[in-house]
Amino acid sequence: MKITKRQLRRIIREEKNRLLTEGPVIGFEWDRSGLAMEMHVDGQKVASFMRHREVEELIQQLQDLLAGPMRTSP
């Protein structure tokens, strides 16, 4: 089955919108000891930051992302 350019564009647009609206849930919280900050994606721990410098770098990266072009929903 062949797909036209128009159909391909529509599929890409729909998938992009789906990803923007149904993206992963990302959260941060301090661990039980209070000495490390943990990053969770969709409820799974993916990273742990134990140094103050690491946390500051993460905050700066997030601020840079937020300062960029904003995503909008359809």
Image (spheres, rainbow, N blue to C red):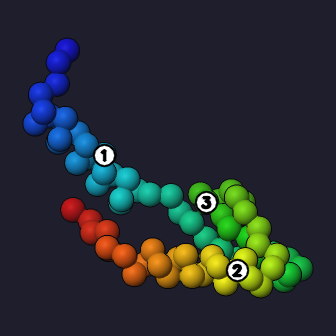
Report the mark closest to the observer, 1 or 2.
2
Q: CA distance from mark 3 to mark 2?
A: 17 Å
Judge the density around disc 1: few (<14), some (14-19), many (≥20) Cα neighbours within 10 Å. Answer: few
- Residue found 64% across the figure and 79% down from its top: 57
Q: Which residue is mark 2?
A: 55
Q: Is residue 25 above or below residue 67?
A: above
Left or right: 13 in relation to 38: left
Q: Secondary structure at mark 2?
A: helix
Q: Which residue is mark 1?
A: 15
- Residue found 77% across the figure and 84% down from its top: 52
Q: Amino acid at mark 1?
A: Glu
The dot on residue 41 is 3
Q: Secondary structure at mark 3?
A: strand
Q: Amino acid at mark 3?
A: Val
**Chain-order first, disc 3 or disc 1:** 1
Percent of width and height locating residue 54: 73, 77
Q: Nearer the viewer, residue 4 or 42?
A: 4
Q: Are marks 3 and 1 in contact (CB under 8 Å)?
A: no
**Chain-order first, disc 1 or disc 2:** 1
Left or right: 54 in relation to 6: right
Report the mark closest to the observer, 3 or 2.
2
